[in-house]
Image: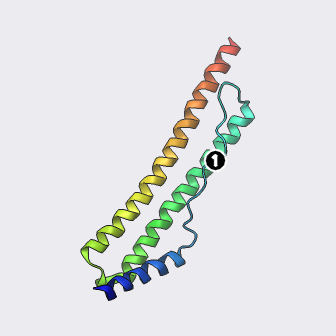
Amino acid sequence: MKFIDAIVAIALLSAGAAYADCSYPPPPDHIPDGNTATLQEMVEAQKAVKEYDKAINAYVACIKLEHDDAVTKGGDKLTKEQLADMERVEVQKHNAAIDQLQSIADRFNEQVKVYKAKNDKSKS
């Protein structure tokens, strides 16, 4: 059993090396306050959030490839428990990335609402 665990560990490590680009992308540096932000700051933040969305989607695709590669390399040597653990780890990484993306998007969208409300009042 220890031998099989060692093979699985090697497969996982080699999969990690093959997909070394699966680094978690950093979130945007700053979401401006809609009460004080300029239009330019809001546009720049929107671009940063869109880029973060692309980066998270690339990360999620990468961890999926990493997982699939590890499963393929492990082949028949993987137990059901090992497969389930590998699946659980991938799902946790995926969900954490999507939750972070959603949190950032929600914060940005809230500040857009504040910005629009402030500017609608000043135009009246």
Q: Is residue 15 left or right of residue 74?
A: right
Spot the residue most to the bottom: 3
Spot the residue most to the front: 2
Q: Is residue 43 left or right of residue 71?
A: right
* Residue drawn at (54%, 61%) of the image: 58
Query: Residue 104: horizontal and vertical position, in percent?
Result: 55, 42
Spot the residue most to the top: 124
Query: Residue 44: horizontal and vertical position, in percent?
Result: 70, 41
26 or 68: which is nearer to us?
26
Q: Quadrant of residue 86?
A: bottom left
Name the residue type under label 1.
Answer: Pro
9 or 102: which is nearer to us?
9
Query: Residue 3: horizontal and vertical position, in percent?
Result: 33, 88
Q: Residues within 10 Å of mark 1 (few under 14, many from 20)?
A: some
The residue wearing badge 1 is: 28
111 or 6: which is nearer to us?
6
From the viewer's perspective, is residue 121 above or below residue 75?
Answer: above
Query: Residue 106: horizontal and vertical position, in percent?
Result: 52, 37
* Residue drawn at (43%, 77%) of the image: 12
Assign the C terminus to one quadrant of the image. Answer: top right
* Residue drawn at (40%, 64%) of the image: 90
User: Is label 1 in a helix, a strand or a loop?
Assistant: loop
* Residue drawn at (50%, 42%) of the image: 103
From the viewer's perspective, is residue 1 above or below residue 28?
Answer: below
From the viewer's perspective, is residue 108 above or below residue 68?
Answer: above
Display coloring: rainbow
Assign the N terminus to one quadrant of the image. Answer: bottom left
